[in-house]
Amino acid sequence: RKYELIVSNPPYYLPGRGQLSPDPVRANCRSFLVDDWRTFGEKCRSALLPGGTGWFVTLSENLPYIRTEWKDLSFTELN
């Protein structure tokens, strides 16, 4: 299935960053324990219709990493 709009509040932290919750559900919501920013970006890109829009909320400290990981995924950054 493809979407015109994806709005997401993905996990903020890569493994080893931030405080890991002892609750496994919260830990997975807060940190990339299974995937990473690259995988998240690829999945979002593949789920968008041509011309579709993705809005993602993240910490500003993640931006350099995301810019590197997503440079070939054709996302436009808005601040």
Image (cartoon, grey):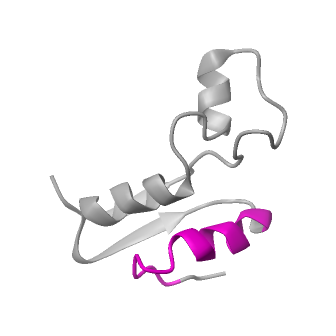
- The quarter of the picture where residue 11 lies is top right
Is residue 50 magenta-colored?
no
Horizontal arrangement in the rendering, residue 75 relative to residue 59 (left or right):
left
- Residue at horizontal 50 percent and vertical 59 percent from the top: 38
Q: Quadrant of the C terminus?
A: bottom right
Magenta residues (range)? 61-76
Is residue 70 magenta-colored?
yes
Q: 8 or 41: which is nearer to us? A: 41
Q: x, y percentage for residue 24?
A: 63, 17
- Residue at horizontal 76 percent and vertical 23 percent from the top: 21
Check the image and report above or below for 19 versus 60: above
- Residue at horizontal 56 percent and vertical 82 percent from the top: 77
Q: x, y percentage for residue 78?
A: 59, 82
Check the image and report above or below for 49 versus 79: above
Check the image and report above or below for 2 versus 29: below
| Outermost residue, left side | 1
Q: x, y percentage for residue 31?
A: 66, 38
Q: x, y percentage for residue 45?
A: 33, 66
- Residue at horizontal 55 percent and vertical 56 percent from the top: 37
| Outermost residue, top side | 23
- The quarter of the picture where residue 26 lies is top right
